[in-house]
Image: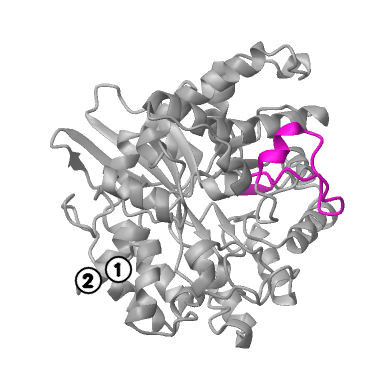
Amino acid sequence: MSQYDFYVDLHCHPAMKPFGKSFNKTNRENSTKLSDKSSIWHQQTPNIFKKIINTLGSLTKFTQSDCTTLFKGGVHVVCASLYPLEKGFVKNKLGQNMISDIPLNLLTGIGDKRIDYLQNLDSYFKDLEEEYQFYQQLDGVVVKVDNQHKVRYKIVRSYDEILSYVDTNPDSDVITICLLLSIEGMHVLDCGLYGANSNSDINLLKENTDKIKNWQHSPFFVTLAHHFWNELCGHAKSLVGIADCVTNQEYGIGEGFTEKGKIILHQLLENKNGKRILIDIKHMSVKAREEYYQILKEEYASENIPIIISHGAMNGLTSPTNPSLSSIKTGRLFYKEDINFYDSEMVEVAQSGGIMGLQMDERRLISREALKNVKRSIRRHMLLHYRSEIVWNQIQHIAEVLDKHNLPAWNSIAIGSDYDGIIDPLNGFWTASEMDLLASYLERHAENYFKNPNCSLDKENKILPSEVISRVMSSNALQFLEKHFKS
């Protein structure tokens, strides 16, 4: 690891489930009682029954990034993503009734009352502010984990503030988890409320953008698009399985930026009326991503704005204009859809000084066909070896793509788990509590890789396996924050 003995996660949702459960109460309290499901500290571990449900049905009936789990996994710096669930989920093909609530609750675990509230929601922005307030309720409040460890989370506003907590006096008996806020989906501005029939007021969107930029804890970055049309830019197809069966995300797929979207993009990137908020390109359509790269080159060339993929994976294809199989052999194993990223896009990320957080979603990391060929074992250590290799293949692929373009191979990769989003985690690496295990197994794969005589990386990219994994699990993200996360 880095000089600091903890991990960094660039994208997860610690509050999604407890905030949803808080709607069972009149005061929507983020409870200090760890046994309360409306507490961000409430941990539901994956027992054997829940693991079987996840393996068979891709349903995650346990918590993955609650603050207790983050603490136990040594994940002490986290980009906590605020996400008002889109109405495209709650007003779906099954209608708006108890029957339609069942699959959504199974997928998200947010609770029936939260779903009912969202079905009647008339302002995403109000919901966004309420989730932000939910985090603020326990900001800095010390709780006892397992009746012995004193832990708190702090919402931070800069890298220097992170340092002030991780450099705390070693004699202190309080551990701090640093939360940086981000937002997933700029529908939160109150656009896209009515799907294809939406026609939001640009002045309202600009006003809400200014409000976000002037929060006490303004987001470090925002994901511009998400699962459904938001009037700003097109999105990539993202839903599979049950979610795909009951929803319709077709409208707006593959579209580029709208005029409204360009206005909001520039407002976010401005260094006035609040500090610049960076853009996360995950969920944007390929067309919108390509337009964004061009905007950066033509209008912000001197400003060194980094491209962020907070939670993503490679698709093993060369480029949007040449979607042939990558010359890097690992590419044949990957999920080929354009929700994932092309080799040429990873080069854009690295050249911009940007970063990609690898997502711990099995459905994104590997194709269904390749997954069938992953070895299985009843011995846990072998299972973890085989499943961690799925992540390693992505890391190796990125390194070889960047090396091929004479770029530093290992500097642009991090973890952006998307835990407690609507994901299907890798078997064996169910939650943030397994981050230490993941690091250990990835280091073994790195050792095997460098021992292979066919490893053709340039000399400067052949570094110690332990250093590779230190960069991926913590130091790359910390160096990125040091450069860009400023008050």
Tag 2 and tag 1, C-beta contact below 8 Å: yes
Residue with the mark numbered 2: 24
Give the residue drawn at x 40%, y 63%: 107
Residue 84 drawn at (x, y percent): 44, 68
Give the main secondary structure of the magenta stretch. loop
Q: Amino acid at mark 2?
A: Asn
| 197 versus 114 height, above or below | below
Residue 167 drawn at (x, y percent): 38, 27
Range of magenta residues:
306-334
Q: Residue furthest left?
A: 147
Report if residue 357 is visible in the image.
no
Residue 484 drawn at (x, y percent): 60, 42
Residue density around tag 2, few if under 14, some if 14–19, many if 20 or more, within 10 Å: some
Report if residue 408 is visible in the image.
yes
Residue 177 horizontal side relative to residue 366, left or right: left
Viewer-closest of 454 and 113: 454
Viewer-closest of 147 and 217: 147
Q: Which mark is residue 111?
A: 1
Which image quarter: residue 328?
Answer: top right
Residue 52 horizontal side relative to residue 452, left or right: left
Q: Amino acid at mark 1?
A: Gly
Give the residue drawn at x 59%, y 56%: 277
Give the residue drawn at x 43%, y 77%: 90
Q: Is residue 324 magenta?
A: yes
In this rendering, the label closer to the viewer, 2 or 1: 1
Q: CA distance from mark 2 to mark 1?
A: 8 Å
Q: Is residue 281 magenta?
A: no
